[in-house]
Amino acid sequence: MADWELKGKVALLVLDMQEDIVGEGGKGEPLGFPKACKEAGIIPRIQALPKAFREKKLPVVHIGAVQATDQGYSVIVPKDAVTSSDKEAHEFSLTKVLPLVSLITTTQGVLSEI
């Protein structure tokens, strides 16, 4: 992993983690989102991030879908805290698309920097 540091104003943006998307019986269930989240084990890691940010008195923003880079945010993606029901699309996003606009790291990488 490349060396990096948090610069400027820091906030955690939690994307698309609404109960209706990732919860059993929600709108995301037919697309396999709750199952994918459970299989990838991302929920505990996602829960650790806001907890740590709040302990440091850093803002946490829960949003649906956001164009963070369009809004001027530097985006850091903890790859072990994201998933998809489509494994090929997920891998493609993490290796080909997201690195163009964000830093790919891990939950622990983020936690160790804040």
Image (cartoon, rainbow, N blue to C red):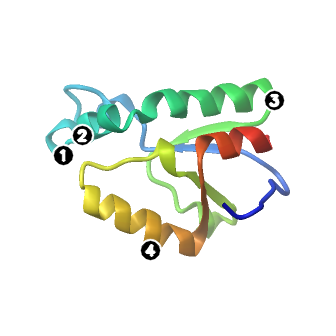
For marks 3 and 4, give the one nearer the viewer.
Answer: 4
Identify the residue shown where x is 51% and y is 51%. 79
Q: Amino acid at mark 4?
A: Lys
Q: SS of the residue at dot 3?
A: loop
Q: Quadrant of the C terminus?
A: top right
Residue 75 position in % (x across, y down)? 63, 59
Query: How far apart in space, not on screen, are marks 1 and 2 (Cα)?
Result: 5 Å
How many angstroms separate mark 3 from mark 2 (CA)? Answer: 32 Å
Query: In the image, is residue 10 above or below residue 102?
Result: above
Q: Which residue is mark 1?
A: 31
Q: Quadrant of residue 95?
A: bottom left
Kindly identify which numbered label has been placed on residue 28.
2
Q: Residue 93's x, y, as percent?
A: 40, 65
Residue 5 drawn above or below residue 48: below
For mark 3, what is the residue? 56
Q: Disc 3 or disc 2, which is closer to the eye? A: 3
Q: Earlier in the sequence, mark 4 or mark 1?
A: 1
Which of marks 2 and 3 precedes in the sequence? 2
For disc 4, the marked residue is 96
Element type at marker 1?
Answer: helix
Q: In whole angstroms, how far apart are the C-alphas of marks 3 and 1? A: 35 Å
What's under tag 1, amino acid-wise?
Answer: Leu
Amino acid under disc 2: Gly
**Dots 1, 2 in contact, CB < 8 A:** yes
Q: In the shown orientation, is residue 26 left or right of residue 60?
A: left
The mark that comes first in sequence, 4 or 2, is: 2
Q: Secondary structure at mark 2?
A: loop
Q: Position of residue 25 (x, y in %)?
A: 19, 26
Foreground mark, 4 or 1, reads 4
Mark 2 neighbour class, 10 Å CA radius: few under 14, some 14 to 19, many 20 or more: some
